[in-house]
Image (cartoon, rainbow, N blue to C red):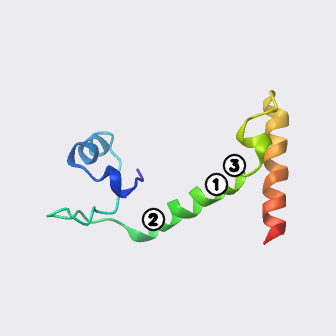
Amino acid sequence: MFGDRAYDGNPVRKAIEAMGATAVIPPHPRRKNPAAWDSHLYKARHAIEHGFAKLKQFRALATRFDKTARSFSAQVALACIVIWLRL
């Protein structure tokens, strides 16, 4: 389970452990005993978040103008193509 530094607390980490998942949360700088975390997995999370942020730039996707799942998925596909062609 991924999270920002704001979620670096013992109760959150224990809840993640109870679910059987591994916490990938960078330790807060003021934490006395920082927990280990995988920076490579965290970078992958960051890339995924930026991908969703780029998709949200399209107003029709962010506000979900399309009511049917078929037309919404078509809009997502078109937005992904536009984003890919911009690079």
Q: Position of residue 76 (x, y in %)?
A: 78, 46
Q: Amino acid at mark 2?
A: Leu
| Picture layout, residue 34 above or below residue 77 | below
Which residue shows up at 75% across the image and 34% down it?
Answer: 64
- Comparing 8 with 71, the one in front is 8
Dot 3 falls on a residue whose secondary structure is: loop
Q: Label 2 neighbourhood size at 10 Å, few (<14), some (14-19), many (20+)?
A: few
Dot 2 falls on a residue whose secondary structure is: helix
Q: Which residue is mark 1?
A: 53
Q: Position of residue 1 (x, y in %)?
A: 40, 50
- Comparing 16 with 52, the one in front is 52
Q: CA distance from mark 1 to mark 2?
A: 19 Å
Q: CA distance from mark 1 to mark 3?
A: 5 Å
Q: Quick check: marks 1 and 2 in contact, CB under 8 Å?
A: no
Q: CA distance from mark 2 to mark 3?
A: 23 Å
Q: Which residue is mark 3?
A: 56
